[in-house]
Structure formats: structure tokens, C-alpha cells
Image (cartoon, rainbow, N blue to C red):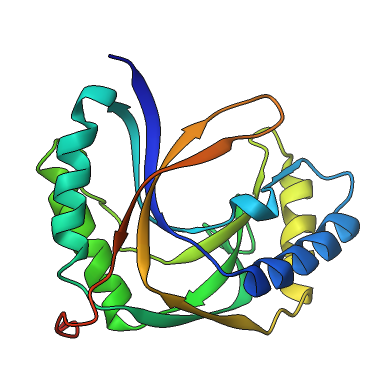
Amino acid sequence: MGVLRAFIAIDLPAEVRQNLSKVMHKLQQDLAGYPIRWVTPGNIHLTLKFLGDVSEQNLNVLTHLLEGEVQTHPPFEFSVGQLGAFPDVRRPRVIWIGVEAPDELFGLQRGVDHVMAKLGYARERRAYQPHLTLGRVARNASGSQLREIGHHLRETHVGFLGSVRATEVHLYRSDLRPEGPIYTRLFTSQLNPAAPPAIL
């Protein structure tokens, strides 16, 4: 049995992907020449949990636990918009579009994090900040490059890009390639319309 890299995420509809792609195209033009690795628009998703290395032998147990947890949560909607960066726009390392989400998303993420911890995957130490990653600034970027990228991000306005109706949660395999990662869907679980709303 082998080992694979995996993560748990929510997909985006085509209209939202198209709007994100337009934003990325403009940023790529404006920030051409800067050391930024941009995400392929088709790979943009809302991550709930990055698992890292997963033994293929454990996949059945993992998907069983994930299915059981996901079915205790109802579908929900979230909106997409606003440009930001981690750790902040003055020192950008990860460029992202924000997600304005209801309590149901945070409840689902906490539930997934908790159930995956039963399999030995470390709990998230930081508070969950839902976002859609557009690009990552190279580690060897100079201080002046970071400041210039940050200045441009602060000057760039990105409004509302669409809303997403979340009805499914997916387990993805990630294969790293020189041209960028390739994601393969391994498992899908449906959110449960009969589940009670989140109480935080």
C-alpha cells in the first residue's frame, strides 16, 4: 500500500471560478515579473482540512469517518469577495480572496478537524480563516518586492464575486508536478438538509 497527499474541500461553481479567473488575470498582468506562483483557476477550492500524507490502507476508515461527520451538518451558502493576504497585505506571502461564511461553515470545519484528529491528523492550531488562495509569493522574494506587492494589493479593489451553495464535501488527492499540482477527487459526501443548524 502506498501513501498519497490529500485534503478535504468544498468546490466552487463555474460562475465563481470565472470571476476569480478574471481577478487573477488582472493581478498577473499588474504583478508580472514578481516571484508569485499563481494557482490554476480550476484548482481553486475552499479547503476545510489539509491532511498531508495519507496511507491508502486508511482510506476506507477515513472516508467512513468523514461521511459520518458531514451528514450531521446542513447545506449552507457563503459569499466570495475582497482581496487579502497572509500574514497581512504589508508582508504578503499568500494572496487570497475572502469568504464570508455562516456559522454552518465553521461548525463543519471544526467537526471535520475533530474527526480527523481521531485518525492522528493534527488539530488546527490557528483559528480557521476561510479563504480562496490565488497565489503564493516565493520565499526568496526581497523585502522591497514584498512591499511593492503589498502596496499593489492595497490599491486593488475586489468586490463581490458571487455566492456558493455548499451541498457536498470532497476528499481530494494532490499529485505534485513541475507544472503544478493535479487534484483528483477520491470521495464525496453530501451535506444533510435534515441536519440541525449550527449553534456556536
Residue 126 at what x, y percent from top left? 30, 56
Name the residue at 28% across, 25% down: 56
Relative to 193, does residue 114 appear above or below in the rendering?
above
Residue 98 at what x, y percent from top left? 54, 72
Q: Quadrant of the N terminus?
A: top left
Out of 145 and 197, give the one closest to the viewer: 197
Out of 30 and 144, give the one closest to the viewer: 30
Name the residue at 31% across, 78% down: 75
Q: Please give left or right for residue 142 compared with residue 173 in the image.
A: right
Out of 189 and 32, give the one closest to the viewer: 189
- Where residue 194 sits, quadrant-wise, is bottom left
Residue 158 at what x, y percent from top left? 71, 79
Q: Quadrant of the C terminus?
A: bottom left
Q: Please give left or right for residue 101 compared with residue 163 in the image.
A: left
Relative to 42, does residue 165 appear above or below in the rendering?
below
Name the residue at 28% across, 72% down: 106
Relative to 41, does residue 155 appear above or below in the rendering?
below
- Where residue 163 sits, quadrant-wise, is bottom right
